[in-house]
Amino acid sequence: MGRVFRVKPKRIYRQNGTVLTPEMEVVVTLSEKTLGMCSTPFYNQATELKEQYMRQYGFDLKKSGLMPKDFIIEKLD
């Protein structure tokens, strides 16, 4: 069983004509294989988190330059 996190931005971010708001939260599940001993969704260059934001909202975290300090991360399991 992987670890589950709820991630949402702390404030509004604008980037390349798209907007990321605090209401745009995602739930990310990290498998044991990708997680290892780390306890944050920003492990492994935030691959799962980037994919989830792109899938749900069309927001490209890779180009935005946002860091873990820009998000509220809540562990759900």
Image: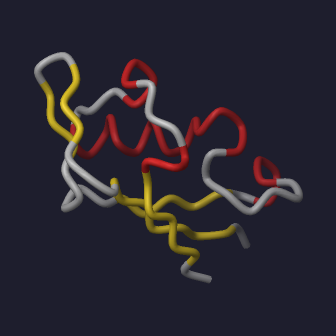
In the displayed structure image, the side of residue 16 where residue 38 appears, left or right: right
Q: Residue at x 88, y 59 (%)?
A: 37
Residue 3 location, quadrant: bottom right
Viewport quadrant of the C terminus = bottom right
Q: Relative to residue 2, is residue 46 depicted above or below?
A: above
Q: Relative to residue 12, is residue 7 depicted above or below?
A: below
Q: Check the image and name the residue furthest to the bottom.
A: 77
List x then y, in percent, for residue 22.
23, 58
In the displayed structure image, the side of residue 8 where residue 31 appears, left or right: right
Q: Residue at x 14, y 28 (%)?
A: 18
Q: Residue at x 23, y 33 (%)?
A: 58
In the displayed structure image, the side of residue 29 where residue 59 appears, left or right: left
List x then y, in percent, for residue 27.
43, 63
Q: Check the image and name the residue furthest to the left.
A: 17
List x then y, in percent, for residue 30.
65, 57
Q: Residue at x 45, y 25 (%)?
A: 65
Viewport quadrant of the N terminus = bottom right
In the displayed structure image, the side of residue 69 where residue 21 appears, left or right: left
Depth check, front residue: 20 or 56: 20
Residue 25 location, quadrant: bottom left
List x then y, in percent, for residue 26.
36, 59
How many numbered discs sit on the rendered protein?
A: 0
Q: Relative to residue 65, is residue 36 depicted above or below?
A: below
Q: How is the image coloured?
A: secondary structure
